[in-house]
Image (cartoon, rainbow, N blue to C red):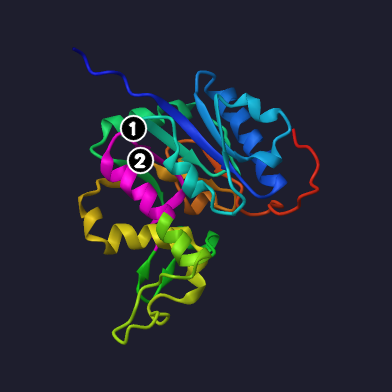
């Protein structure tokens, strides 16, 4: 009996704010424009919906926080999932190759990177206890692997304890929150939670992850300076993380 072909698709999540919904619709349309056969799952706060969400192939509802993406990651209907932040836009047909890259690798997850050379675009990357290197904005993962399922669940649960419940933070030798090595300002970042899990939790020493080849093409921040970020081709996915209004609930239609 031959192995069954894995299901493959993109995961987009929009919650809390009207603008995230509008950006997500634009992203889904851009995926379909460059990869018409793509399957797309859309996790969305139900009250944001106005009918345009029907462009997605799978729809599920999420709650009302800014980090519902972490819940969405655990609910993907696909074996191989490419997660993209809602404020991204696909601009090249090479987007169709993302699952091939994962299958050709020896990795459970392929991330895009946060690098020192591109640090001028990031709100936070280095801290006394380490540095963020894996970008949780755009990545592709194999949800058939139990260690990957566990990571997605632990990422969600630990972030909720870290930020929303305020019940977890790394401790110093005195048993108090270690804000010297891990500044309190990093509590807001789910990227710190990811860093902690893959660097400090023994369970995830077995996780196989890597940086996707030519990764800047897959997560081209709108403020990147081309001469400082060389790539082998034009951007595949542009990330409009700066210069957009994420929190204006009365924002009008786009497109």
Residue drawn at x 47%, y 40% is 83
Task: Give the residue number, with chain letter if any, for mark 2.
Answer: 213
135 is within the stretch colored magenta: yes
> In this rendering, would 135 be left or right of 224?
left
Locate residue 78, reporting x and y percent: 41, 29
Q: Secondary structure at mark 1?
A: helix
What number is the disc on residue 82?
A: none
Q: Is residue 243 above or below residue 174?
A: above
11 is within the stretch colored magenta: no
Locate residue 202, reporting x and y percent: 22, 60
> In this rendering, would 93 be left or right of 196?
right
Q: Is disc 1 in contact with disc 2, using a CB cutoff of under 8 Å? A: yes
Q: Secondary structure at mark 2?
A: loop
Q: Quadrant of the N terminus?
A: top left
User: Which numbered disc, 1 or 2, marks the residue that appears first in the sequence?
Assistant: 1
Q: Which residues are magenta?
A: 132-156
Say which of 77 and 224 sits in front: 77
Task: Give the residue number, with chain letter if any, for mark 1.
Answer: 101
Q: Quadrant of the C terminus?
A: top right
Instruction: In the displayed orientation, state which residue is furthest to the bottom.
Output: 174
Location of residue 177 (image quadrant): bottom left
> In this rendering, would 231 be left or right of 24?
left
Q: Residues within 10 Å of mark 2 (few under 14, many from 20)?
A: some
Residue drawn at x 52%, y 61% is 122
Instruction: In the displayed orientation, state which residue is furthest to the top.
Output: 1
Locate residue 56, reporting x and y percent: 58, 27
């Amino acid at each position: 009996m031959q192995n069954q072909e894995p299901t493959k698709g993109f995961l987009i999540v929009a919650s809390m704010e009207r603008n995230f919904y509008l950006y997500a619709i634009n992203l889904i349309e851009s995926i379909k424009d460059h990869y018409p056969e793509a399957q797309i799952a859309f996790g969305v706060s139900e009250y944001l919906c106005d009918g345009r969400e029907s462009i997605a192939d799978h729809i599920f509802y999420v709650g009302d926080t800014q980090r519902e993406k972490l819940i969405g990651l655990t609910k993907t209907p696909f074996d191989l999932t490419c997660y993209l932040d809602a404020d991204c836009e696909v601009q090249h047909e090479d987007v169709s190759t993302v699952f091939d890259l994962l299958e050709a690798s020896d990795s459970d997850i392929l991330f895009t990177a946060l690098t020192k050379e591109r640090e001028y675009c990031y709100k936070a990357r280095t801290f006394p206890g380490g540095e963020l290197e894996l970008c949780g904005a755009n990545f592709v993962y194999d949800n058939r692997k139990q260690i990957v399922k566990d990571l997605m669940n632990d990422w969600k649960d630990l972030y909720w304890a870290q930020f929303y419940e305020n019940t977890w933070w790394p401790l110093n030798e005195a048993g108090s929150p270690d804000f010297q090595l891990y500044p309190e300002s990093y509590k807001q970042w789910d990227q710190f939670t990811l860093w902690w899990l893959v660097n400090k939790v023994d369970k995830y020493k077995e996780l196989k992850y890597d940086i996707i080849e030519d990764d800047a093409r897959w997560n081209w921040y709108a403020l990147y300076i081309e001469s400082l970020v060389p790539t082998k081709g034009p951007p595949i996915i542009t990330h409009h993380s700066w210069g957009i209004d994420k929190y204006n609930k009365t924002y009008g239609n786009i497109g």
